[in-house]
Amino acid sequence: MGFDLLQFLPTMRERSESEVQRVFIALAARTPTAELQAYLRHLVGSAERGVARDAYRALVTHFRSPAGEDLGRFRDDPVFRRLAIEAIGKRPSEQSIDELISFLSDDPIGETAVATLSEMVTRNPWLLPVVIERYRAAGNAPALRTGLARTLASRVEYVVTVALREQWQDAEALVGDILRTRQANGILLLLNRTTDHAQRDSITALIGETVRTDPWLHSEYALHADDEVLAELGIDRVVLDHQRGSRKAENPRRRIVVVALASVTVLPLAGYLAWAWFVRGEISGGTFISYLSGFLWAFAGYAFVLNTIYLTLLLIAVACVIRQQRAAELRTHSLLFAPRMLPSISIIAPAYNEQETIVESVTALLNLNYPDFEVIVVNDGSPDDTLHRLVEHFELERTGREITPHLATKTVRGVYGSSRLPGLIVVDKSNGGKADSLNVGINASQKEYFAAIDADSLLEPDALLELAAGMIDSEHPVVAAGGNILPVNGCRVEMGVIEQVGLPRNRLARFQMVEYIRSFMSGRTGWAGIDSLLIISGAFGLFRVKEVVAAHGYLTGSEQYEKDTVAEDMELVVRVRRNRYDRGERGVVQYAANANCWTEVPETVRVFTAQRDRWQRGLIDILLFHAHMAFRRRYGRVGLIALPYYYLFELLGPWIEVQGYLVLLLGLSAGVVSQEAAIAAAVASIPLGMLVSMVSVQLVEYRRRVFTVGGRLAMVWISLVENLGYRQLASAVRLRAYLSVLRGTTGWGVMRRRGFSKKESKT
């Protein structure tokens, strides 16, 4: 077939239609003849850019001529030079090493050259001596020496071992240059793991001066080296702050918070007293009792409006779930797995001190049912055994995978992979927080979308498929999508797979189970139904890579806004939406009601309080950071409906609710409020809330059964009793966040993980 088509090439050589040109480009893989090679060179020199790029890719892939010879008019084009580098990297030889070295000083593509060199010497260790020889011959060429040192960083253990064995004269200088690239954490891992004291002593003597005098290396070793290694190096231990990275401008201005709190606490009482004085002419005990009754009626109205909104969202959610179910019944498995039907996805899992669950979590991610995905685990400078357990269990080695710096981040210390598991990449980086880790994962991604999940969470096998399948039916570009988060407490887990679903035994965790189901199935599904969804959980969310890069990634102190936040998930959704509106483009944020992610929830009041404090601090920060979007038609339903709701019911709501509960309790105890007002407040709060909770539980099982009959009955009971203590606790805990903001508290705090249960659970 290929040779039959080639007979038409002389007569069609000058045809300018791109379709015709691409037919012959495609033939290069099957019929790499000299005649076709000449035609491809002709296209590179004369065709439009897109065709020329495809012709050049075919030329450097299927013909053995030096890649740089055919660049022609595109010699200064970074895209074409990257293609040349990739082609050279596929032909390991000493000549290829020299060709790649010529690109190291090229700023736009030097990173690609380093990554390709690293990958080449990792796959072909016999080329390492060649790179070392070229490093020694580099003389006083800083860019060249640095590029070669970064190449050797991926095999630093080999370099150190050989240098000590052969007693190289330049060993300290060479290893010092490698260490200063900040990508040679292999030495640190080797020092921590070796049981050969003589080897450890030799290595510490070799690197000691460099580590002690370089501030970054000194800090990294002080944080992560074993005590015996630190003693050898003469460095004091530094304990990593639990906040996970320094924080910049994380909290809003205190003055704004004070004004907001005064508007719902002091001002109502002050206004009523002023009215009583100027209108009625007196202030007495009866005046205060009258105020309490009036406040209670106002609280009943507030609760009625809030629960009416919940019921409206619930009705919308029911319609959305039914619509999603009908659409799912039409999508066959073969349709979803057809080429290019669903987007390619990078699953990014930031990991910090996740040694208890990291192996099971990653195993579950690798077993997901999806046509085109990769798993990128980002170790955020964990001081525990997270990285070591990943390397040991999955048999990982350092690789030369390129990480394109689309977004500014903390230093990447190393990239690990395995030929046995080509879909798993582990990136080790300096501590910078979850948002910084996600930005590193975005830089490492080579897919169209990325899914941000927590490393201690478990996805159901079809969760990613369910999340992405809704994009098929969307009339507008999908910029983000979210799914359900359910507590894994009480479930039996085996090797990253939930074998049996069960209710948590812990009472606090049981209340959270019902709360999570209500929040996700009713709230977020409903908000997505009116295209106003603002929150996608950081534990499980899907985002379009180019949209996030255009918005400058997650909010961190390293990026454009020089600001950190603990609510990176909500902030990113709001900013991506804002950017689309500012460009006059429509973008959809979807919600998949059948895509489930399971995560561990707090089982002690202390950890629960710290978690909700962080959530509320983040909400306060983001709502005030994006305050200019509220009540503006330019931002559509987000500005006119969603943001006003969050300001009234989520930002100020905790203060209104706690005051309402206190007035109700004190008024009934003292007998100073009317029974009608008390009954109105109770009816507006409890029955409607129960209805929303119970219907939400049914919705989560609309497509398939998740809980046993006993479990469903237990959740009905929890829906009733949560109104008698738990909801008041949750509101009171959220108040603490305002005090934390006023005190200037930052960071994530600590959440102790128990790990996944492997025992039978009782429902």
Image (cartoon, rainbow, N blue to C red):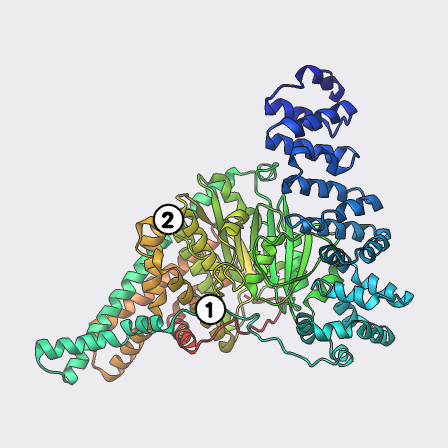
Residue 489 appears in the figure: yes
Give the quarter of the figure containing the N terminus. Answer: top right
Residue 395 appears in the figure: no
Image quadrant in which you'd find residue 688: bottom left
Relative to 498, is 266 above or below? Answer: below
x 81%, y 68%: residue? 172
Q: For mark 1, what is the residue?
A: 250
* Nearer-the-camera pick, 34 or 670: 34
Of the numbered discs 1 and 2, the one sitting upstream in the chain is: 1
Disc number for residue 530: 2
Mark 2 nearby-residue class (10 Å; few <14, some 14–19, many ≥20): some
x and y percentages locating residue 203 in the rendered image: 82, 72
Relative to 55, is 321 above or below? Answer: below
x and y percentages locating residue 80 in the rendered image: 66, 39
x and y percentages locating residue 38 in the rendered image: 74, 25
x 76%, y 42%: residue? 88
Q: Is residue 155 left or right of residue 731?
A: right
- The residues tagged by marks 1 and 2 sit, at their Cα atoms, a distance apart of 31 Å
Q: Amino acid at mark 1?
A: Glu
Secondary structure of the residue carrying tag 2 is: loop
Secondary structure of the residue carrying tag 1 is: loop
Q: Residue furthest front?
A: 140
Give the quarter of the figure containing the C terminus. Answer: bottom right
